Image (spheres, rainbow, N blue to C red):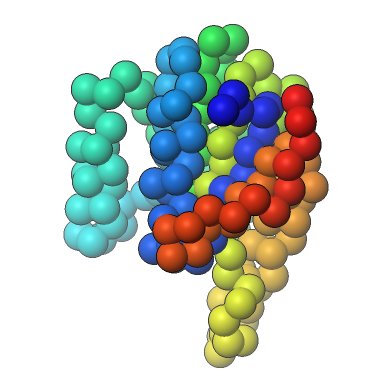
Amino acid sequence: MTLPPLTLVIGGAASGKSAHAEALVRAQTGQRVYIASAQAFDDEMRAKIAAHRAARAGDGWRTVEAPYDVAGAVGALREGEVALFDCATFWLSNLMLAERDWQEEADRLLAALATRRAPVVVVSNETGQGIVPENKLARAFRQAQGELNQRLAAGADLVIAVMAGLPMVLKQERP
């Protein structure tokens, strides 16, 4: 399957969304670019990031670390490349924890995605299906993530939800 210009792969934590998104990108021809937004603030995240890097090592991936400026990373993509942005959830967390205007940054990202020169697969978490969080920051994050996901899905040509490792197409527009 040839990827459309913008694909969103969404699902819960440990749902298999990243593995599915990587498989979509691996099936394409051209240089693979991994736009990584996670930051390692503890040993668990350092191990998780190391495992992801090891899985891509020697497999033709170019990694771009972009904890804040994903719009810039998308804008720097070249024709003939295919990109995986993993993930919008870490990126949003980074922005909110740094007290940056996430809506302004989302506008920049969506503009970059609308004019990108290469197909992009975006991975994001669905955070709104659980209980109402107990604290203000968590509730604000859940709300922001839901709004960001809606905006990404509206602009995407293909939206795939992954649950228990099973992909389900929610939206598909033919290129």
Q: Percent from the top left, x then y, of residue 64?
A: 42, 28
Name the spot of residue 169 as percent of width and height, x first. 64, 50
- Residue 25 x/y as whole percent: 47, 30
The picture quadrant where one finds residue 155 is top right
| Front one among 19 and 132 | 19
Q: Is residue 54 left or right of residue 70?
A: left
| Quadrant containing the C terminus in the rendered view | top right
Image check: 95 left or right of 67?
right
Relative to 8, residue 32 above or below: above
With respect to residue 114, does 13 lie above or below? below
Q: Which residue corresponds to the image point at 47% horizontal and 15% vertical from the top-left?
A: 29
Question: Which residue occupies 48% across, 58% down?
Answer: 166
Q: Can the viewer see residue 103?
A: no
Please name the residue shown 68% across and 41% down the image: 158
Residue at 56% x, 18% y: name it. Answer: 77
Count all numbered tags in the image, as a single digit.
0
Front-most of 24 and 85? Answer: 24
Q: Position of residue 17 (x, y in %)?
A: 47, 52
- Compared with residue 25, is residue 68 higher up or lower down, i.e. above or below? below
Say whether residue 32 is visible.
yes
Query: Looking at the figure, which quarter contains the N terminus?
Result: top right
Name the quadrant containing residue 147: bottom right
Q: Quadrant of residue 76?
A: top right
